[in-house]
């Protein structure tokens, strides 16, 4: 499917993947705040990082002086990441004032996004919040007075009932996003957070998306006479658990992966081929297909997997990023950490 993007969105995307001066694709060494949001299996993932100029006595007056990101995703995901960085750079933001940048601000900066791509702007806003939480922990800042509990770490989402099997989203998370983003239909939910965007079985199932919408807005109507200040306070508290969907301590995850890798028996060439085929068919190709792309494995020699991108991915300026951030990463995690992916 060919999406209709604004000229500004297309330019930001092209400039970013070409590495033009003034763009922000990359990593920051010794970043003061790092946050992640999304899932490669779902087709979009983002890591956002920033560095601050530290105030001598008051961390709340730290000023963000550098921002960068790594994003796997389509044109809108990369352009939304660039937009977020540009919005932060427009003035001297502290980490807390940067939190005022919303997904709507990002979409507006891009001169709009297709409804089906609004989730990309949400991803950026939530990755930013995760990075601010990381900064607060490092600087010893208590965010609870600002309605953000840095110790919560998505416990509600983890312990909720799984509603959308395809994107692993729970009722607690979906309910919170319905309120936070003012979503009023199943299409609104899918466009904003992807829930219900694949098989659709959760649309009208018991406890599914429609039931959650009815529940949220029924409750909202029953409490509509509450003061505006109470509503604002509740909304602020709901900010506490966004954007750490897959961002546990990276060092701990890497150490665990290393130990597990040491205990794995070496795969034979046949076993390697079957395992690669399984990961490609079950995880990689479905993710690419959501944006009209596809991939085939051409050959496997030792630990080198030769791949060919197809469909919308073929010739895309972000093809190299797709191979490294998605294909190679998933094959390293699920098959062999020594795998290298080469495009042919």
Image: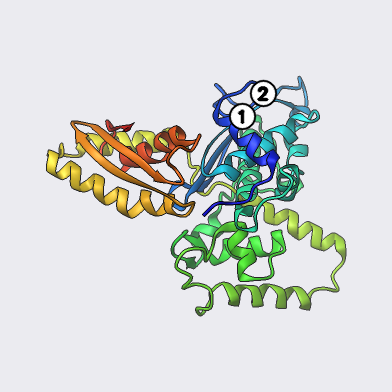
Q: Which mark is residue 94?
A: none
Where residue 258 appears, x then y in whole percent?
30, 33
Question: Image quadrant of residue 181?
Answer: bottom right
**Residue shown at 50%/58% (left/top)?**
158
**Residue shown at 21%/36% (left/top)?**
300
Q: Which mark is residue 22?
A: 2
Visual colour scheme:
rainbow
Determine contact: label 2, label 1, CB under 8 Å. yes
Camera-near label (2 vs 1) is 1
Disc with the residue nearer the chain's start (2 vs 1) = 1
Where residue 316 appears, x then y in whole percent?
48, 38
The kind of secondary structure element at disc 1 is: helix
Classed neighbour count for the residue bearing mark 1: other residues with Cα under 10 Å, few (<14), some (14–19), many (≥20): some
Which residue position holds label 1?
15
Where residue 297 appears, x then y in whole percent?
27, 42
- Front-most of 224 and 47? 47
Q: Is residue 213 left or right of residue 258?
A: right
Q: Is residue 194 visible?
A: yes
Q: Is residue 33 visible?
A: no
Question: Image quadrant of residue 140?
Answer: top right
Distance (Cα) linking label 2 and label 1: 9 Å
**Residue shown at 46%/46% (left/top)?**
312
The kind of secondary structure element at disc 2 is: loop
Q: Is residue 247 above or below residue 290?
A: above
- Front-most of 72 and 49? 72
């Amino acid at each position: 499917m060919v999406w209709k993007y604004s000229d500004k969105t297309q330019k930001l995307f092209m400039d970013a993947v070409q590495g033009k001066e003034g763009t922000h694709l990359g990593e920051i060494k010794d970043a003061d705040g790092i946050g992640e949001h999304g899932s490669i299996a779902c087709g979009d993932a983002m890591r956002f990082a920033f560095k601050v100029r530290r105030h001598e006595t008051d961390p709340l007056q730290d000023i963000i002086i550098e921002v960068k990101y790594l994003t796997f995703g389509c044109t809108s995901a990369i352009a939304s990441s660039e937009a977020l960085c540009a919005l932060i750079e427009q003035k001297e933001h502290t980490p807390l004032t940067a939190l005022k940048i919303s997904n709507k601000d990002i979409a507006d900066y891009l001169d709009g996004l297709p409804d089906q791509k609004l989730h990309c702007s949400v991803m950026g806003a939530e990755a930013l919040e995760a990075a601010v939480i990381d900064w607060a922990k490092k600087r010893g800042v208590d965010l609870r007075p600002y309605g953000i509990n840095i110790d919560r770490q998505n416990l509600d989402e983890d312990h909720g009932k799984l509603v959308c099997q395809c994107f692993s989203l729970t009722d607690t998370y979906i309910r919170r996003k319905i309120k936070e983003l003012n979503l009023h239909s199943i299409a609104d939910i899918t466009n904003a957070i992807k829930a219900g965007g694949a098989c659709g079985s959760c649309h009208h199932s018991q406890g599914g998306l429609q039931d959650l919408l009815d529940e949220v807005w029924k409750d909202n109507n029953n409490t509509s006479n509450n003061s505006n200040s109470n509503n604002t306070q509740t909304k602020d508290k709901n900010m506490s658990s966004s954007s750490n969907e897959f961002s546990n301590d990276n060092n701990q995850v890497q150490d665990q992966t290393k130990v597990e890798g040491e205990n794995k028996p070496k795969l034979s060439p046949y076993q390697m081929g079957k395992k690669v085929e399984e990961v490609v068919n079950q995880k990689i190709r479905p993710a690419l297909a959501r944006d009209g792309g596809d991939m085939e494995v051409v050959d496997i020699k030792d630990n080198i997997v030769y791949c060919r991108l197809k469909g919308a991915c073929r010739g895309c300026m972000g093809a190299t990023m797709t191979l490294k951030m998605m294909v190679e990463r998933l094959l390293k995690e699920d098959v062999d950490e020594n795998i290298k992916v080469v495009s042919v």
